[in-house]
Amino acid sequence: MNYRYLSIFLLLASITLLSTSCEKEPDGDVVESSNIEVRFRALIDGQPMVLNERYDYNGKDFTISSLKFYISDLVLVKGALEANVKEIDFVDFGTSNTTAQGAADGVVVGGASIPLGTYDGLKFGLGVPSDLNNEDPTDFSSNHPLGADSEYWLAWDSYIFHKVEGRYDGDNNANDLESSYVYHVGLDENFREKTFSNLEIEIAEDNTAQVVIDIEVRDLMREANGNAFDFEAVGNIHSATGDGSYPGLIADNWVNAFSL
């Protein structure tokens, strides 16, 4: 065996391994990074919301059986700089809010490692951005957030950005919640962005940062004047046309329902 060539090979291999184990800026400086978890919680009157549990709504009982939404372009902001946390994900409270403890825990969205530092803002899209919304589930793998047929509406040529579904007492007989409501919103014009400013989110070495974002479910179902929806008057929202101003109103409500 030629030990001289073996030594050269081992030296080159070690250099390659070292160069690929560190993130570097274009100028060659090593970028130190750590992780972040963004936790979403669904609340009713500030308390964890449990799916299919009865709540009061203008003196009548109602339930939430399904609550889900697409989140996109989730980034941390530091001045003019942005650090990408997640390009696209699907938050489904059906995976968490079936028990009181699960509702308190919420749904976690994680992402790539973030450069260390203190960030002063966080923003994300509510829905699917137009470039991805022009695709359909066949363009993605089955385990991709956009790979689910059930979240795509062919008649719209659009993903359903967010869903709220449940039942309510429509005949003043609380023994049976005989009526249902469905609020499904999609289409590019109903894409919205939520921004939080004046924050102090520290990404520190050897520590996973935690950010908790709450959504008040009642605020999703309000008229522009702040009054609660009349379920019977609003009807079901699930069409590209014929729903009047409600899809845009509900999209705006989603933006306003989030808090830190």
Image (cartoon, helix red, strand yellow):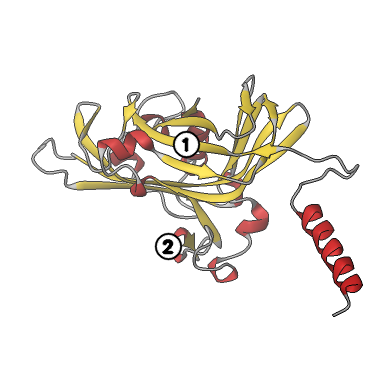
Horizontally, residue 44 falls left or right of residue 27, namely left
Quickly name the residue at label 1: 39
Residue in the image at 47% along x and 36% along y: 39
Residue at 53% x, 38% y: name it: 37
Relative to residue 15, is residue 185 depicted above or below?
above
- Which numbered circle lies on residue 150? 2
Three-letter amino acid code at disc 2? Ser
User: How dense is the environment of label 1, judged by Cα within 10 Å: few (below 14), some, or many (20 and up)?
Assistant: some
Q: Quadrant of residue 3?
A: bottom right
Q: Is residue 2 above or below residue 173?
A: below
Of 248 and 135, which appears nearest the observer? 135
Secondary element under disc 2, as helix, strand or loop, is helix
Name the secondary structure under disc 1: strand
Q: Is residue 145 above or below residue 8?
A: above
Which numbered tag is attached to residue 192?
none
| Residue 52 image position (x, y, % from top left) | 23, 43
Please say whether residue 249 is visible from this viewpoint.
no
- Mark closer to the chain start, 2 or 1: 1
Can residue 107 be seen from the camera position used here?
Answer: yes
Q: Is residue 236 left or right of residue 18?
A: left
Q: Position of residue 94 (x, y in %)?
A: 34, 48
Dot 1 amino acid type: Arg
Q: Quadrant of the N terminus?
A: bottom right
Q: Is residue 54 left or right of residue 39?
A: left
Residue 248 pos. (x, y %): 52, 40
Foreground residue, 13 or 260?
A: 13
- Indicate the quadrant where residue 100 lies: top left
Query: Which residue: 52% across, 64% down?
Result: 147
Q: Pinpoint residue 258: horizontal percent, then vertical percent.
A: 49, 30
